Image: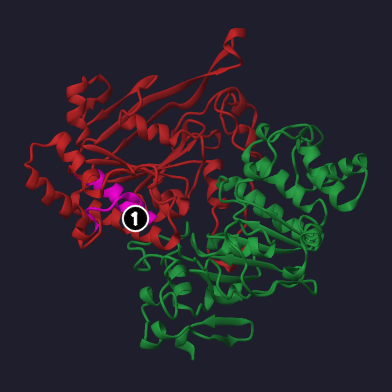
Chain colours: A green, B red
């Protein structure tokens, strides 16, 4: 049996009311990072070390009951595929009210009023009718709105959004991104947005972390990252982005393939693909370096 | 120069039954492709762009006669492909191939790469076994999987998504086709691998003089890949133009909306760009809206738009759009 270190020594911080993007390719460990914060890592995976401090408490030290009081109330999460996370045999209104009853100890009538209010907040068309619909009766965009309504019904301090628009069409994607941005402002919520799409980070995030093969390789303010990326992986990614604003004859690429995490490369995990590789890169893991205030990078180039 | 592919008034309706048959469920039709016409010139890449359910994949399959149409014709080098008998069609299949979106579903997991790539030669050629082996090795080399001998006996699960898509592309170019329908060929791939695959498609086009029908929902990819673009909405082509012209002077409100909704990977530009948000979602293709199918979501809709369907109008610079704003 091999051990896959899906998330390895990841360190990230989200300030109050801040929108932080976590970007990476498939298998980079970004979703597992989010599941770790929620303590929902699926078996046989487990958290083997570290600390998750949320409002001055270490979440890893809470017992399951205490953690349940956090999940869905102080921290809530929305997902790429809302159909998987909505109960198919329960009406939308009842599902949202259930969360409210569970966390706020309000009687059912009051909870339904809060549910209706949440559906209005996410601009669901005809919310009072949708309350009585089942998930299969809704379109993809409406399901995502319903899931967001459920996530905000208890006014969380942190909203984790894992690829919330990947399954949606572009016109609906823009609507949902706009909605997430507005909700963040209105409820003064912090946001952790997980995505593979730099375009989405560019639209709504304040700060970004870039993940590669289970590690964070760079973290910076969104403008600093775009204009002054330091890590060769980040630079490579930014170069091979396609924009509707510009034609590229030959597209820049990053050579090679993403490594297997059961057997990751030694030293810096990016070294087999890195154009600036040096002997030390394959020997030792690079230390974190603050190249500018608030801009840190894990790379031997800057030591 | 005659067009390689001429699509004329093509329609495809799918029958759906609603309700239980014992209660005499109603027969209804999904209007997947509804009266579209376009040409693809030899050596060009035509982008076919639209949101899910707009009929772009159905169009691609009709163009290869993987589906039979409800009405209309597709001519390949002047001959109607729907009139061919089985033998003639098999001959034609050498010249038209497809690359699928999902590199996990489109390769047989029980076959080795060698078996997958030698199949087209067994079906269509009269090469000797040793000649086929040489062809397969050369194919792997062409799509950048070298040294070929390292990969040839592996099964699909031993490859990453990007490598599998290369195998799918190798299979498509095996018999030197003229036309390749690429149906969302990079949508399932990661960013860094996406650019590699697009470069490969461009390079193969140059080397073999291929013609592509490039189906995608991503306008950022189209800009760098296509010569001309057709925009589809609910089974109709609403706009068709050269790629540069379309991005600089979009004419149809729907085209403007999807261009405006495509994320721009630059925070300064993204945040200073005025966005025209579309409301609502794509209606059901079972009962498409009357008149212009876009009218329920269009901010310029006027009474004409609800009554009668606009046809594609030439607005100059070989640019056509189906909208009353331009008549």
Q: Can residue B127 be seen in this snapshot? A: yes
| Residue A204, position as x, y percentages in the image | 65, 62
Residue B88 horizontal/vertical position (percent): 17, 24
Q: Residue at x 67, y 31 (%)?
A: A137
Residue count near mark 1 (Cα–Cα under 10 Å), binned few <14, some 14–19, many ≥20 = few
Question: Which span of residues is magenta-colored?
Answer: B151-174
Pick whichever, B283 or A280, lies toward us: A280
Residue bearing mark 1: B158
How many callouts does the rendering have? 1
Q: Identify whether B39 is placed above or below A263.
A: above
Magenta stretch, main secondary structure, is helix
**Would you say A138 lies left or right of B324 here?**
right
Q: Is residue B156 magenta?
A: yes
Quadrant including the N terminus of chain B: top left
Outermost residue, bottom direction? A303
Q: Farthest residue in the front direction? A: A1
Q: Is residue B41 above or below residue B135?
A: above
């Amino acid at each position: 049996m091999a051990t896959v270190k899906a998330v390895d020594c990841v360190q990230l911080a989200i300030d109050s009311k801040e929108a932080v993007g976590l970007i990476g390719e498939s298998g980079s460990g970004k979703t597992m990072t989010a599941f770790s914060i929620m303590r929902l890592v699926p078996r046989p995976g487990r958290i083997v070390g570290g600390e998750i401090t949320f409002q001055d408490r270490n979440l890893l030290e809470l017992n399951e009951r205490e953690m349940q009081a956090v999940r869905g109330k102080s921290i809530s999460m929305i997902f790429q595929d809302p159909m998987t996370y909505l109960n198919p045999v329960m009406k939308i209104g009842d599902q949202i009210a259930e969360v409210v009853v569970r966390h706020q100890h309000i009687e059912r009538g009051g909870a339904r009023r809060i549910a209706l209010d949440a559906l209005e907040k996410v601009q669901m068309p005809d919310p009072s009718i949708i309350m009585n619909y089942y998930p299969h009766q809704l379109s993809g965009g409406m399901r995502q709105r319903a899931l967001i309504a459920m996530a905000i019904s208890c006014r969380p301090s942190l909203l984790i959004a894992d690829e919330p628009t990947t399954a949606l069409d572009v016109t609906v994607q823009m609507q949902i991104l706009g909605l997430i941005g507005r909700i963040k402002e209105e409820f003064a919520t912090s946001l952790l947005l997980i995505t593979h799409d730099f375009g989405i980070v560019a639209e709504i995030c304040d700060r970004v972390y870039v993940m590669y093969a289970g590690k964070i390789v760079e973290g910076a303010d969104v403008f600093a990252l775009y204009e002054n990326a330091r890590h060769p992986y980040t630079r490579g990614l930014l170069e091979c982005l396609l924009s509707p604003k510009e034609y590229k004859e030959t597209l820049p690429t990053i050579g090679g393939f993403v490594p297997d995490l059961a057997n990751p490369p030694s030293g810096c995990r990016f070294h087999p693909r890195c154009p600036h590789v040096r002997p030390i890169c394959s020997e030792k893991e690079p230390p974190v370096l603050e190249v500018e205030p608030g801009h840190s990078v894990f790379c031997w180039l800057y030591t | 120069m005659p067009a390689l592919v001429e699509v004329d008034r093509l329609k495809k309706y799918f029958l759906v039954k609603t309700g239980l048959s014992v209660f005499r469920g109603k027969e209804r039709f999904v209007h997947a492709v509804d009266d579209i016409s376009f040409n693809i010139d030899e050596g060009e890449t035509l982008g076919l762009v639209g949101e899910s359910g707009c009929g772009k994949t159905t169009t691609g399959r009709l163009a290869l006669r993987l589906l039979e149409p409800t009405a209309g014709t597709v001519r390949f080098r002047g001959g109607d492909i729907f009139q061919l008998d089985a033998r003639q069609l098999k001959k034609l299949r050498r010249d038209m191939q497809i690359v699928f979106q999902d590199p996990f579903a489109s390769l047989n997991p029980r076959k080795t790469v060698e078996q997958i790539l030698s199949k087209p030669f067994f079906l269509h050629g009269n090469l000797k076994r040793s000649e086929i082996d040489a062809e397969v090795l050369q194919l792997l080399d062409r799509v950048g999987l070298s040294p070929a001998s390292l990969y040839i006996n592996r099964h699909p699960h031993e490859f990453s998504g990007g490598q599998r898509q290369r195998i799918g592309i190798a299979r498509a170019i095996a018999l030197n086709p003229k036309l390749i329908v690429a149906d969302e060929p990079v949508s399932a791939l990661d960013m860094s691998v996406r650019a590699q695959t697009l470069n490969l498609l461009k390079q193969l086009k140059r080397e073999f003089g291929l013609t592509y029908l490039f189906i995608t929902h991503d306008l950022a990819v189209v800009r760098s890949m296509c010569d001309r673009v057709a925009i589809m909405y609910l089974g109709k082509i609403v706009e068709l133009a050269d790629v540069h012209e379309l991005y600089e002077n979009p004419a149809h409100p729907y085209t403007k909306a999807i261009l405006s909704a495509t994320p721009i990977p630059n925070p300064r530009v993204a945040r200073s760009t005025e966005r025209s948000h579309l409301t609502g979602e794509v209606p059901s293709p079972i009962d498409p809206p009357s008149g212009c199918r876009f009218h329920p979501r269009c901010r310029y809709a006027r009474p004409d738009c609800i009554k009668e369907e606009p046809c594609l109008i030439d607005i100059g610079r070989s640019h056509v759009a189906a909208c009353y704003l331009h008549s």
